[in-house]
Image (cartoon, grey):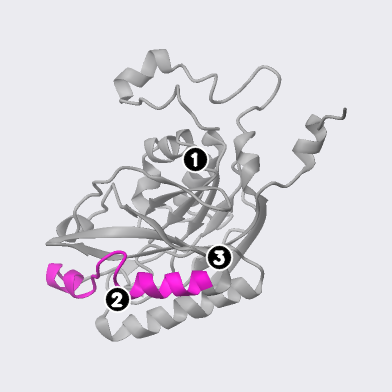
Amino acid sequence: MTGTSHEQYTNARFSPVRVAVVQFDPQVGLDNRKHNSARVLELAAQAVDAGANLIVLPELAATGYSFTDRADAYAHAEEVPSGATVRGWESFAREHGVHLAGGLVEQDGLRLFDTAVLVGPDGYLGRYRKTHLWNREKLYFTPGDEGLPVFETSIGRIGLLICWDIWFPEVPRLLSQQGADIICSLNDWVWTPPPLFDETGKCMATYLTMTAAHVNNVFIAAADRVGTEGDAKFLGCSVIAGTNGWPIGRVAGPEEEAILYADIDLASARGAPVWNELNDLIRDRRTDLYDGMLGYRLGSALPR
């Protein structure tokens, strides 16, 4: 009788994925909706041609970001998943056999949400409504009310977060504690306290993404946008971070439209917390000391 060695498991690729992070310049305004939609599908098709099967778009990729007032935000909104944008993304995902995460303005009754949706080869998988609202977003949107979901898919477990969420370490931590293999981070990163970039060209959000990947041993694919709208200038710096936190490939520049790629094995995230013979990042957490104070309740029942 023969068994399967540990070496065979560690050398195998159980969930091989080519991730594509799309950095581009969607513009606000009803006259730009058609162009934004076409540009998303054009860039997604380029990613498919390059072999990608998980595509990550920026926050509000369908609409642009800088609404003039609440009525303007309503004018850009649609229902999820029945609206035209999600239906179009579903059709693309079905046709090409890929998973795609993208952002739009969701209308639910009289409420608006800054929402990320995930679609796959079998259609709509779910949504995440932005939990932490940045600046004037609070004048348009309702904070997310459905928690921090992780979606089971045919390629692995996928979590979603949006922009300002990455500044709150609880978000990637709770997604990873629910078993996320990769977090798709949809962003419209704007001004932060200066300096905006360091000598390597990275912005603070790049480092926060890398740190969150490192301390949670999870892949993070962060798609930002570029360009300007009104007084908002967007920072670029999209990145795909490995479970060790380091970028896989390059960090995108602050001005360019670009697609970043990474070939990864999503299932490898499930063994990543074991760093050596004596240290396991999840096991070493002192939940007895701080979970009660922080309100965490997931540390003892992980699906990894």
Residue 92 is one of the magenta-drawn residues: yes
**Percent position (x, y) of residue 274?**
64, 27
**Percent position (x, y) of residue 106?**
25, 64
Residue at 65%, 53% (x, y): give it.
Answer: 248
The kind of secondary structure the magenta stretch mainly shows is helix
Q: Count the marks: how many?
A: 3
Query: Is the C-beta separation of discs 2 and 1 under 8 Å?
Result: no
Q: Is residue 56 left or right of residue 233?
A: right
Depicted 73 relative to depicted 281: above or below:
below
**Percent position (x, y) of residue 104?**
32, 66
Residue identifier under label 1: 212
Q: Is residue 214 left or right of residue 223?
A: right
Q: Is residue 253 left or right of residue 274?
A: left
Instruction: Identify the mark at residue 98; answer none if there is no mark.
Output: 3
Does residue 190 appear in this view? no
Residue identifier under label 2: 28
Q: Is residue 116 left or right of residue 239?
A: left
Asked whether 31 or 124 is in front, the reply is 124
Looking at the rendered image, the disc whose residue lies closer to the viewer, 1 or 3, is: 3
Q: Which amino acid, by three-letter code, is at mark 3?
A: Val
Query: Is the C-beta separation of discs 1 and 3 under 8 Å?
Result: no
Within-10-Å neighbours for mark 3: few <14, some 14–19, many 20+: many
Residue 4 is one of the magenta-drawn residues: no
The magenta span reads: 69-94
The mark that comes first in sequence, 2 or 1, is: 2
Q: Which amino acid, by three-letter code, is at mark 2?
A: Val
| Displayed quadrant of residue 53 | bottom right
